[in-house]
Amino acid sequence: MQDSLRPTLHPELSYKFYNVGSEQTPLLVIDNFIQDAPSLVEYCAENTKFSKVDNFYPGLRMVAPTQYIHAINRYLAELLSNIFGLTQDKIAGGKALYSMVVTPPDQLEITQCLPHIDSYLSGDLACVHFLCDKEKGGTSLYRHRKTGYEKITSENIDHYKQSVVEEGALKFDIKSYMNGSNAYFEQIASVDAMFNRMIIYPSNILHSGNIAPDFNFDPNPISGRLTLNSFIYCKRTS
């Protein structure tokens, strides 16, 4: 896919949405999203400029074609409005990044072993477009057992962080990725990876990729765990 071209929707696109957890948070699952999804992989393979662009993501990222995030906003406008209440006039912008998990567990930062959020600001959305198959692992949403928090906000973030420290959730004998429930976090929803499947959820819900103990940390975008991770930002009200 060239940057000057616009991706088009797959003619067999289908979707389901669920309200998950005690907070009944919307989770949208779209199958057969983009008509020529293999071209997204080809673009990535031909223009590989991966780098470690942030200190949190356990792998490599590369900026996606600018038209990709525009396509999400344009094609999914009705769904984003109906399911998440994010109308076009409320969208402040967004970004899309090719992403590959390549960091072995023993090299993880401590916080990378826990579910995380992408933003604590209400209204922002996170999208994961799987350009890999089921065996590469999907994505799960979580509840913090001690506090009961599923979404982390500006009001509860300090209490959440304090609770995580006090209960010992940051102490590990052996580092590992989240992959199901544990003593501190309960999995409240899980979606398998499937090629050309996209999932969308609020950016402030606790979540993690499902990275199994036998995961192959393949850095090749054609054969590894390639996803397009997009973030849609909501305008702030004063």
Image: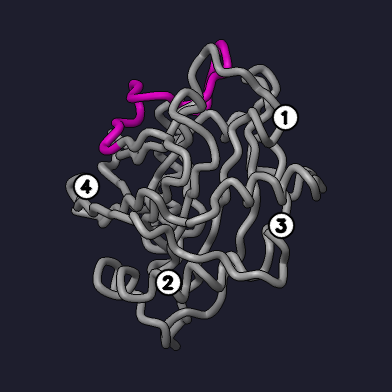
Task: Report the colour scheme.
Answer: one colour
The residue identified by callout 1 is: 219
Q: Residue at x 54, y 17 (%)?
A: 172
Name the quadrant containing residue 7: bottom right
> Which mark lies nearer to you, 3 or 4?
3
Give the farthest residue toward the front: 11
Q: Earlier in the sequence, mark 3 or mark 1?
A: 3
**What secondary structure is the magenta-colored segment mainly?**
loop
24 to 3, vertically: above or below:
above
Q: Earlier in the sequence, mark 2 or mark 4?
A: 4
Q: Residue at x 67, y 34 (%)?
A: 222
> Which mark lies nearer to you, 2 or 1?
2
The quadrant of the picture occupied by the N terminus is bottom right
Name the quadrant containing residue 10: bottom left
> Which mark lies nearer to you, 2 or 4?
2
Q: What's drawn in magenta, residue-wise?
A: 169-189
In the image, is 237 to the left or to the right of 18? right
Q: Amino acid under label 3?
A: Val
The kind of secondary structure element at disc 4 is strand
The kind of secondary structure element at disc 3 is strand
Q: Amino acid under label 1?
A: Pro
Residue 156 appears in view: no
The residue identified by callout 2 is: 75
- Between the residue at mark 3 and the residue at mark 1, the CA separation in whole angstroms equals 16 Å
Q: Earlier in the sequence, mark 4 or mark 1?
A: 4
81 to 100, vertically: above or below:
below
